[in-house]
Every structure is written in structure tokens, then in C-alpha cells.
Image (cartoon, grey):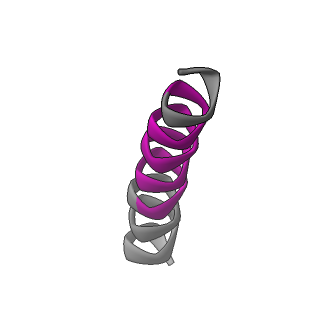
Amino acid sequence: MLRQIVCFACISELLVHKMLEYTKITHF
């Protein structure tokens, strides 16, 4: 159970990072 939560946190962090990168690219 705890492992799933940690995995979800990792994936969400990765998604946020990708989204930030994507928005950075679209801004320029």
C-alpha cells in the first residue's frame, strides 16, 4: 500500500515536471 502511494507521488512529480517543461517550450 505504501509503495503504491510512493509510486504515485513519483509519477505525479514526473508529470508536473513534464508539464512545466512543456509550458516553458510553448511560452517561447
Q: Residue at x 54, y 43 (%)?
A: 22
Q: Nearer the viewer, residue 24 or 28?
A: 28
Q: Residue at x 52, y 65 (%)?
A: 8
Q: Nearer the viewer, residue 1 or 7?
A: 7
Q: Residue at x 37, y 73 (%)?
A: 3
In this rendering, would 8 be left or right of 27? left
User: Taken as a whole, is the magenta stretch helix, strand or loop?
Assistant: helix
Q: Is residue 26 above or below residue 18?
A: above
Q: Can residue 18 be found in the magenta stretch?
A: yes
Q: Is residue 3 above or below residue 17?
A: below
Q: Residue at x 45, y 45 (%)?
A: 13
Considering every residue shown, the one lying at the far front of the view is 28
Q: How many marks?
A: 0
Q: Nearer the viewer, residue 9 or 14?
A: 14
Q: Is residue 19 above or below residue 14?
A: above
x and y percent of residue 7 in the render? 40, 69
x and y percent of residue 25 in the render? 49, 34
In this rendering, would 27 be left or right of 28? right
x and y percent of residue 15 in the render? 53, 54
User: What segment is highlighted magenta in the picture?
Assistant: 11-24
x and y percent of residue 20 in the render? 52, 32
